[in-house]
Image (cartoon, helix red, strand yellow):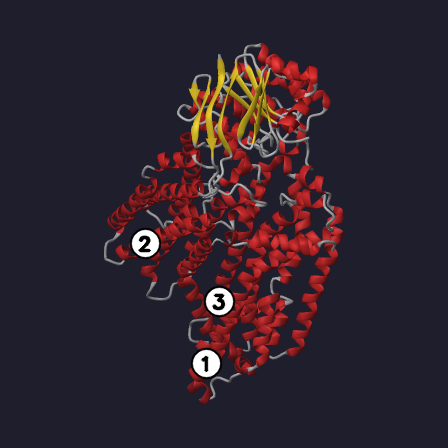
Amino acid sequence: MALLSVNNLTKIYKGQVTTAVSDVSFDVNEGEIVAFVGPNGAGKSTTIKCITGIQPYDGGSVIVCGHDIKTDPINAKMNIGYVSDDHATYENLTGYDYLNFVCNVYRVPVGERKEKIQTLADMLEISSALSKQINTYSHGMKQKICIIAALVHSPKLWILDEPMTGLDPRSAHMLKELMRSHCAAGNSVFFSSHVLEVVEKLCDRVVIINRGSIIKTLGEEDLKEIAQTSSLEEYFLALTGGN
Amino acid sequence: MTNFLSVFKLDLLMNFKLSGGDKKQIAKKVGLIVLLLVAFALPLAAVLIMLYFLSQVAVFGGYLDELINMIFLAVQLIVLVFFLPSYINSVWFSKDRQLLASMPIGGTAVFVSRMLVIYISTLMISVPVTLIGGAVVAAGSASAGEMYAPLIQQGELTLTSQAQVYGTAGYYIMLLLASLTLPAAPLFVMAILSFPLMKIISYFKRNSALKTIVMLVAYGAFFALIYIGSFALQNSMQDIALDGSMNAFDQLNVLIEKMCGFTRWLYPSYFAASAMCGVWQDGIYYVLTIIACAAAVVLGSKFFFSLADTRAIINTGKENSQDAEVKMKSTGVRLALLKKDLLCIMREPQLAFQSFAGAVLGPIVLAVINIMLPMGAQEGTEQFYPAINAATSVLMIIVLTCGANILASVAVSREGQSFKITRFMPISSRDIVISKLALADVFSFICILIDDVILIALSVFNVVDFFGALISVTLVSMGVNAYSLGRDIKNPKFVYNSVRELVKSSSKTLTSMLVSLIVSVAAMAIYIGISLSGLKGYAASGAIWGAITGISVIVCVIFRYKCVTRMSKGIDVIE
């Protein structure tokens, strides 16, 4: 069953003639980890912003767990946990203030929230910082608070935009484990990344975008075949016009 | 001063760029400024007329230099009071401090550049006020001889040499120089004050809410002190004998002495005023003092910046909340949004100060105008004063609670890049609009209530006035808040370097002020009109508030009609 279904998604930014993304279609099924890769400016972040409801789009549809993000945004978003590429949070709130706000918005019962936050915070080794204001956090700590905020309501679909950026090796490993365990519980993960080694090892499928259009979707078999002959990096470079 | 020019060019661009060259936006901004000037033209004209007549009299007693220094003092006080928060914000707390610290740019270059930008901003007040004031004083002193010719001929009055200064080139050269250099002294004071103030602000960084409260109380105390000073001055003027033992000119001289005499001790601006009145040596002292101030600021900046460490500015403060018991409460989405907004504002002291200053300033202004204005009542005019007081109070309440409330006018923009969080979370646009309106409306209501209590306590308002003002001004504020929020949703500004850039350079805050000003002038006119029509007591109050409520309902309905739906759609299309 597809937890995320993107059909012919098209987006044109105000005042621009060319499309930022054009006729983008793909699915993310239950239990899958799907990577979204492409060169800089290919349309990855725009697609993710349209999927999460941050950007309005001009054509096509985005269905999350059976709910259209345009016509039924609240129910669609209730099923998404999102970690943005710039770790957007409310900098003047403390970690606890922010997470409590997120819990209120996603209707996480009071009895559950403290335990969930504590478990995730311990796992990501950020518990001692939760009482401090987010504007005192380092880059990696902000990333971690965003990960906790995205997972605190146990979303069916976890979307991450460039999640590995700024994480130390230990935290990056922990994040990959979290992604695997999230999928093992019957949920899905969809993330964009430039770190093709991670993508190669972690994902069930890879969607490649270039100049606003999907140019290839690689399944598990394709990935195995590529791994045997060369590497995903070489394949990606050849496909997107590199050497 | 490494890379000073690069930083200065950037600062000029950031602070004075008029909407990126968009002619429509520039015309809009200029139009708004003109409209605001027109709105304030009446009180300004009254002050200038008073200045004209005072300068006519001052030339007989030799008080012209003190009178001119009074204008200079006003300019310097305005600069000090209104630019100190901007100064601290842009010099020490701007968002690009860390970025600039990482670049090969000298600390002094940043300091001097920021100071020059503030200086240029202050010229927008200093130059017009000083030049207009100086021109009015010159015109007044020039007409003194003609105006009082009979008394001079009879030998009852003698003109001093100050009556001739309007004809000297030195007067105008020094006036121009003063208009360009008057901000130097307050800027020098700011530079000295800003460092300890920055340290205090940094100390409170963990307790930002407490800092906001401290700032608001200090702000209120400062204004209260100014008003108490004026009040004391007013009281001292009661000493002027009106029993016939003093002639009119002696009385006026005593009045001017009490009003302006103390300014002869206020240097360096007194040097400039004195030079304008013919003592040219004082002009040299003035120029030397100003150069010394500027040099001290530039040299001192190196010392100040070496003392301040960027991380210390951002992160100092006691980590006292780490072990605090964490309490998590469940609330609805709208309340969660409102609480989040309030926390974010309270923990951004500059924004909190701009947002909540009206709650402090309003009661002080109302208390002072209602205590002081009746004291100036001339014999035979006392019966008009209650109506004039009350009408002025109505005008002030509307302007201070509706026009100065920025909670709605930058409600979306103030979130900056964080605004997208509410976009990817399951929060409807309707909830965002309602929570933002609720915050602005509740704050307006609290301010109106406080102001109302002050007015009923001072017997300016009766019970009907109290409830009439509470209802009608609340309606106006609801309308203005909806209008302001609508404008911000239509054209949000998510990228800004400082709160000053967000609030002061925004045409949205100006238009909210303008709408409130128009409504307040109409309400004032209704109040005075009905009060003078012969109606008395509760009947008059009932008629007044009935009419004002009518206008308020119209304002509220016009701006509030379908606003939530329209704004929700507006939020959906923000890119």
Of discs 1 and 3, which sits in the foreground? Answer: 1
Q: Judge whether residue B329 can be spotted in this image.
A: no
Question: What residue is rendered at 70% in x and 58% in y?
Answer: B297
Same chain for labels 2 and 1? Say yes or no: yes
Q: Position of residue B15 (x, y in %)?
A: 57, 53
Question: What residue is rendered at 55% in x and 48% in y?
Answer: B501
Q: Position of residue A114 (x, y in %)?
A: 58, 17
Give the labeled residue for mark 2: B522
Q: The residue under label 1 is which amino acid type? A: Ser
Q: Which chain letter goes with mark 3?
A: B
Q: The residue under label 3 is which amino acid type? A: Asp
Of discs 2 and 3, which sits in the foreground? Answer: 2
Rate crowding at label 3 as few (under 14), some (14 to 19) or many (20 or more) other CA atoms within 10 Å. Answer: few
Residue B143 circle label? 1
Q: Give the left or right position of residue B379, taking residue B489 as reference.
A: left
Mark 2 and mark 1: Cα distance apart in space: 37 Å
Front residue of this view, candidates A144 and B371: A144
